[in-house]
Image: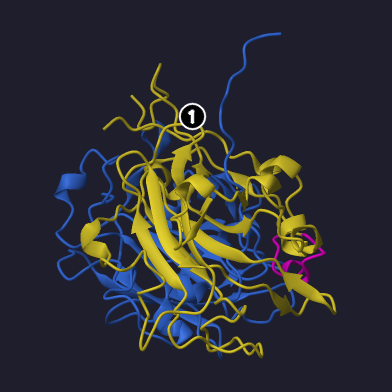
Chain colours: A blue, B yellow
Amino acid sequence: MPQTLNYLRETASQTAGPYVHIGLAPGAAGFEIFETELGGDIAGPNAAGERIRVEGTVFDGTGAPVKDVLIEVWQANAAGIHASPEDPRHAEVEDGFRGWGRVISDFDTGAFTIETVRPGPVMGRNGRMMAPHLSLWIVARGINIGLSTRMYFGDEEEANAADPVLNLVENPARRPTLIATRKNSDGAPVYRFDIRLQGDAETVFFDV
Amino acid sequence: MTTTEFFQRDRTLHPPALTPGYKTSVKRSPQHALLSLQTSMSEITGPRFGHGDIGPLDNDLILNFAKDGEPVGERIIVHGRVLDESGRPVPGTLVEFWQANAGGRYRHRKDTYLAPIDPNFGGCGRTLTDAEGYYHFRTVKPGAYPWRNWVNNWRPAHIHFSIFGTGFVQRLITQMYFEGDPLIPHCPILAAIPDPEALDGLIAPLDMNASIPLDSLAYKFDIVLRGRRSTLFENRLEGN
């Protein structure tokens, strides 16, 4: 018998359930308990760059909106830097920029809104630049393990065409599931980004 | 800080997306294969939290919503460590938890179960692990409750956990169950986990040594997040 590797094994995931708000967004569950709820402000007051809004809905395989979803956002700042010690340039991030936040869908309509700043391009593997994107993590009742995806920006056509991750999606017809559509041409940009858990135009989800 | 990647996630330990016994998963489960991505800076980084983010009572569910008394129920301490797959502690990471009250009722506008709300119990808390990866909190043991899946499904008593780690791809939400709960083998959400050892890993044993005589019982729940490669020969993320 060879030696034993003795690695531990990752704890199994379980669904966040219908009452995820109690733990992660108690105000939405209907009560005040913490001095500060976490994740309400992704970019903070001092972030450089263009303020943007993303509007969307998560749909299930029947086409119905998912009204109890929670989405976490993780992103770089406008200069493409993450507020995390693994990023060699993290000290340059604006004071108060966390680049992380959480949004929930409206209990009646399923609509969600993300308010943040447009991230800059981030260096990808092997020196290939990645187009600006938000990393998203989606949990809800009925989702057994959080779903990872990205949101790219429809008005970054050139950068998207060269993006190494979008180009990994073998069927080009599925790439638009990762790209938000700009809704307005003037004023602060508003994007539309719907997420489809299943069915026609199912969103591309990642094993990362 | 050396930028290193994470071990590949072993998805055989986790419930698959589609688990028909848990009916809501049927139309909320992607059917395409997940697209495997080698991680980049967007994945190996993740948010950090500090003591300024949380309050002094956030890890005490007996006191953090107490109005005119303390919540009803069996007083318990839940404690354990957050480790990675290499067995290294994950220090300073945010652990969040939420649960039903002792009667099995959630303080949530969408929960209509007939068991009463406890006026002194909110049912959520959060804490940061210490330098050795330890966390602890105090609460009352949650009750079992019925839910609409099959005609007569009951959730075993459980506490929901949300854990961050250091990279966004370590993000994990799970549920902790209690040793000896006879509802455990009947639960379709637990049965979604294909690996019996992985399922056992969600069941916290009674820990008499950590209990406080004449006050509180204790349960121990360790959490393992994905491991991070140590740098022997670096697989350079950023190219040459």
Magenta stretch contains residue B29: yes
Depth order, front residue of A87/B58: B58
- Tell me if residue B164 can be seen: yes
- Left or right position of A115 against B202: left
- Residue A173, picture quadrant: bottom right
Q: Quadrant of the N terminus of chain A?
A: top right
Relative to A125, say whether A60 is above or below.
Answer: below
- Residue A134, picture quadrant: bottom left
- Amino acid carrying label 1: it is Ser
Depth order, front residue of B67/A50: B67
Q: Position of residue B50 (x, y in %)?
A: 25, 55
- Residue for point 36% across, 74% down: B63
Judged by its main secondary structure, the magenta piece is loop
How many numbered callouts?
1
Q: Position of residue B152 (x, y in %)?
A: 83, 77
Q: Position of residue B220 (x, y in %)?
A: 52, 49
- Left or right position of B155 against A100: right
- The magenta span reads B19-30
Depth order, front residue of A44/B105: B105
- Residue for point 48% across, 76% down: A21
- Residue pointed to by mark 1: B86
- Residue for point 41% across, 47% down: B165
Magenta stretch contains residue A69: no
Residue lying furthest right = B151
Relative to B2, say whether A163 is above or below.
Answer: below
Q: Callout 1: few (<14), some (14-19), or many (20+) C-alpha neighbours within 10 Å?
A: some
Q: Chain of mark 1?
A: B
Could you say whether the residue bearing mark 1 is in a helix, strand or loop?
Answer: loop
Depth order, front residue of A144/B218: B218
